[in-house]
Amino acid sequence: MNATANALVIEELSAGYGDTQVLWDVSLRVEPGEIVALIGSNGAGKSTLLGAVSGIVNTWSGGVRYGSAVMSGLEPDRVVSAGVVQVPQGRRLFGSLSVEDNLRMGAYLRRDREVDADLEKILAMLPRLRERYDYLAGRLSGGEQQQVAIGRALMARPKMLLIDEMSLGLAPVLVDQLIEILARIHATGVSILIVEQDVQTALEVSSRAYVLETGRVTLSGPSAQLLDDPQVKKAYLGV
Amino acid sequence: MNPATLKRIGLGGITGNPIAFAVVLALMALLLAIPLTHNGYIELVFRNILMYAAMAYGWNLIGGYTGYVSFGNVAFFGIGAYCSAILATHGVDNLLLYVLLAMAVSAVFAAIVGFPVLRLKGHYFAIATLGVALAVTDIIANLDALGGTGGLALHQVDEAHFSIYYYAMWLVALGSMLGTYFIARSKLGYAFVAIRENEDAAAVLGISATRYKIVAWTIGAMMAGAAGAVFAPANGFIDPSITFAIDSNVFPIAMTILGGIGTVAGPFIGALLLAGANELLQRFFVKAHTLFFGAMIVLIVLLLPRGLVWLFGLRGGARAWLKSLSVYKA
């Protein structure tokens, strides 16, 4: 899973759908080995930003680089091959395929012969999935489905993992489990950008964070500092 | 793309129940004997079953595996039929050439039309494909070079060799079936299913929906085109109303759904059952056969919502079946 790490650099990125601009000159960096959080309320443009990085949403201006490689304008398959892989919001599993097939689908673009070995590593990291190996993914609980979604992304051998709203609709105890899993993934050398509405959780697991409001970065800094920021406290933590 | 790379990432294949597929292959082998024992009417009935099966396989790739419900596949069947008729009027009398040209023209047409049409989803895609079929029908009906509404007659082989059309249709059906089987065992088949299950998820894994939708649609078009290419000389005459008949559009869809959508055995089983039942009902109920035919379709959809092929994988008899019905409705 680990390979040469690069920084993900988003520079002055503007993007949107049709005539509607969603992102305005957003700049953001994820250094190799970092966990960075992108927080903000509904409709702030967080998922659009991840879509633009993944090549699903067209960028209007500005750019996305991963190391020295330009990502903006690339087809999604090239972005995945470069090692930047997204865990989409709402899990987005292949419901009528088994857990095993869902995981293996993550390796769709791979041509190496280490897929089985990686699968074994991921199952060791996510033991629940071994118990559910032959189940249809659509029949699993929300927490299990999120684990499948993460495992599926890991099968693509990411160096940079983009995780969209991991905690959405899950009980706090399940969120805690997932955070432990994230820590384990991070320990293997994968950089992580998490996008969260659950600001408390996001700031606790990340080292740095950005606040996105109506498509603009309004605040950024070390996560511990943002946790104490009066603005963040008032707007997102309800204290 | 090939089974070797599939094996490398360890996907098992999405061919459906292996017993059902074995049964279908055995039935196909039996059908090879039909012209030896029966001429005329029975041979015609089974040739039609094979024709519908090939069309159903064509529809199954885009409608079943990829999840894009098309109502336009009859256009490819018709284009295939007219390819044969054009070659025939130019003095070409070679079934293999008919089929090859039909497949090529259907594929090119499908790729060109697919590019804009496959950008649509759901109901919009269904309506647009219906529009394509109607447009092709009307264009051909208004082209004098293609006989217009008056149609075109094709030279047929003499009666002693007439079964060649049956065997040709058998080969087209077998090719469509095996083609589906190998696709379902390849990474290509998984790309189709990924698009059906969740297009967004497919995209973030690097599976280009646009590319693979066009591939599914184009390969399906070649299957329907090949069936049309054999139908035209076998029938001896084609015109827009025969070639683009509503039956040719709706039957393959109904057959795939009743047999088992997104499976390798389903389209053939559905074609055998539906076309066979249609023929029998017409014999016994000259006037009311469509009533019974319709009732039969409704009953199968209600009682076997996942298609007949599903029965092959059923364990636990009638109780398991009843339980599955309540689960399905819940």
Image (cartoon, grey):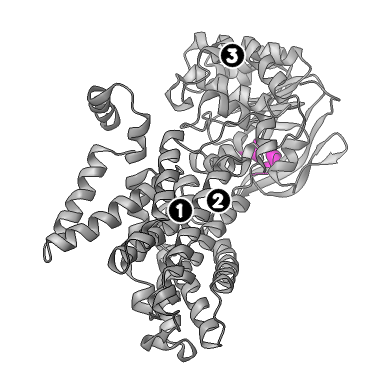
Could you tell me how many numbered marks the image carries?
3
Looking at the image, residue B131 sits to the left or right of residue B315; the answer is right
Quadrant where the N terminus of chain B is found in the figure:
top right
Could you tell me which secondary element the residue under label 2 belongs to? Answer: helix
Same subunit, tags 2 and 1: yes
Task: Report the predominant secondary structure element of the magenta stretch.
Answer: helix
Alpha carbon distance from label 3 to label 1: 43 Å
Looking at the image, residue A67 sits to the left or right of residue B185; the answer is right
Q: The disc labelled 3 sits on which kind of residue?
A: Leu
Residue under label 1: B57
From what the image shows, is residue A60 above or below residue B19?
below
Q: Chain of mark 3?
A: A
Residue under label 3: A178
Alpha carbon distance from label 2 to label 1: 9 Å
From what the image shows, is residue B303 above or below residue A128?
below
Looking at the image, residue B123 sits to the left or right of residue A72; the answer is left
Residue A154's x, y, as percent? 68, 24
Question: For the magenta stretch, what is the residue range?
Answer: A48-56
Residue positioned 38% across, 75% down in the render: B235
Which quarter of the picture shows residue A28?
top right
- Magenta run includes residue A52: yes
Which quarter of the picture shows residue B170?
bottom left
Could you tell me which secondary element the residue under label 1 belongs to? Answer: helix
Instruction: Pick out the residue farthest to the right.
Output: A68
In the foreground, B281 or B151: B281
Q: Chain of mark 2?
A: B
Q: The disc labelled 2 sits on which kind of residue?
A: Gly
Give the numbered dot on residue B326: none
Residue positioned 59% across, 32% down in the render: A88
- Magenta run includes residue B33: no
